Amino acid sequence: MKLKVQTLFIIGISMVLFLAFLMLVTRPLLIRDGDHLDRERLELNLDMVHNYFESEKEDLNRISLDWAIWDDTFEFIEGNGRNYVERNLMDATFDNLEITYMLFYDMNNEYINSSGIEPIDSSMKQTMQTLIDNTKPQELPFLASTPKGLALIDIEKVYPSNGKGQSNGKMVMIRFIDQSFIETLEMNLSLQLESFTQVTKQSAQLKDIQIISNKQLLGTLYIEEITDGKYIEVSMLQNRDYFIQKLDSINNLFITFIVMILMIVLLIYILLDRLIVSRVTTLSGQLRDIQESKDGSTRLGYSRKNKDEIYVLEHTVNDMMQSLEESHEEIKRLAYLDFLTGLPNRFRLQRDFESFAQSSERLGTLFLDLDGFKAINDVYGHAAGDSLLQAVAFRLTTLMQDTPGMVARIGGDEFIILVQHQQQEELGSFARLITEAISEPYEIQGNLVHITSSLGISQLPKDGHKFYELLNHADTAMYISKKKGKNQFTFYENNSENLS
């Protein structure tokens, strides 16, 4: 009886140590991967906010150039445009352009006139006069603090419509970063900001991610103002979904292990057979080898051919490791796929971009946006809209079958197509095939639906080498396609006239 108790005690201690060993080995590996995926997703969301501000700057810059390089504005600065303000600077103008103020100065930086959604006060005029006198020329609008709050400000020299000759003054456009701007940002990006404040900092670090609990991460983005040391601090909370999912999987796995170990201990207590002890030792050694090799695909060998309890344990462990490996791969796969269409998503697109860029002398980035998709959602419902997106994804995938590259959906009704090509004409022909294929009618829920697409195209290396650089250029070209009447494609051209 004493020997049985001692054996039971020894085996019990061994099993506890075995379980602890598994936890120490596998738990950090799994949790680290979940934490990495959560951080990567939060960092991409912070990049989306940063890119949104850059897009707003480019939009304000395009508007400013339209007004600054215009004969009417030039004549107004000269003092000849008597009805310029009454004809052009109406309340509806500011509402449509989503700007707050426009100010005009002569070539000596002397104030001429201003207009806006409300009268501009003296403190605001003084602030703008200081910026006009002291700010170096900027390629894009800049952020600055004003008496009325934070604003995007663009200062442009005024020229005739042909863009030639000498400038006779300057024009300033101001768009305030108010609550409405923040709400629009959150809606467009499907994000919820935690805070949006002005801070002073010395560090050059523009992004920061911190763990604030087992359930949430805090991400912070710093956007620089024109004043040295002044930044806009944008922060957002994100649930640690991948981390929690990994943690739950680990807990379930080890609960199952505890049950199995209790069964083994009871069996060894009854049999008192050294052969069982030796087989358990072998099992532990195999698991140790798996841990040392860190190879999740390795499986346990079976110590005996007859299917006894230990064989079942070995088989179950292999099944669990197989299940865990498959779950891990499935989590990684889902993280890079669009749930609705099954296409690669933005994360997968960004990941695969480098391999395409390295293997291609020329790579086209096509930014596709559906024209009138919101109207279809409004008329037929979101289910019909989802069906239409799936149909569009199928057509794009079909077109790409014989073309080296990939197609991805990055959100809403926006698709990105990477195409390896030799000549720009070849890329244009492929873009024309896309617009023709998209414009073919669709049968959605018994209704015949027509839709078109607008494409913007940027090229590597002509328009840049980095992923977001080419993506932003293609986005810019796509908006030009929409501005020109939609259902067409436009190649990105890096000049101000194309943007205006």
Image (cartoon, rainbow, N blue to C red):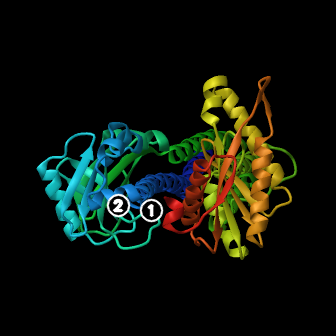
At 50% from the left edge and 51% from the top edge, which residue is drawn? Answer: 38
The quadrant where residue 97 appears: top left
Residue 441 at x, y = what percent? 80, 35
Taking depth in this image into account, of 261 and 155 the one nearest to the observer is: 155
**Mark 2 or 1, nearer chain start:** 2
At 26% from the left edge and 54% from the top edge, which residue is drawn? Answer: 103
Residue 6 at x, y = what percent? 57, 48
Taking the image as shown, residue 196 lies to the left or right of residue 53, namely left
Q: Which residue is mark 1?
A: 161
Does the rendering let one see residue 324? no
Residue 298 at x, y = what percent? 74, 61
Residue 465 at x, y = what percent? 59, 72
Q: Which residue is mark 2?
A: 74
Say which element carries label 1: loop
Say which element carries label 2: helix
CA distance separating discs 2 and 1: 8 Å
Are discs 2 and 1 less than 8 Å apart at CB? yes
Mark 1 Cα-neighbour bin, 10 Å: few <14, some 14–19, many ≥20: some
Q: In the image, is residue 456 above or below residue 450?
A: below
Looking at numbered disc 1 in the image, what kind of residue is underneath it?
Answer: Ser
Looking at numbered disc 2 in the image, what kind of residue is underneath it?
Answer: Phe
Q: Residue furthest bottom?
A: 361
The quadrant where residue 357 appears: bottom right
The quadrant where residue 93 appears: top left
At 61% from the left edge and 60% from the top edge, which residue is drawn? Answer: 350
Does the rendering let one see residue 104? yes
At 28% from the left edge and 60% from the top edge, which residue is drawn? Answer: 77
Q: In the image, is residue 399 above or below residue 378?
A: below
Taking the image as shown, residue 148 lies to the left or right of residue 92, namely left
**Viewport quadrant of the N terminus:** top right
Mark 2 Cα-neighbour bin, 10 Å: few <14, some 14–19, many ≥20: many
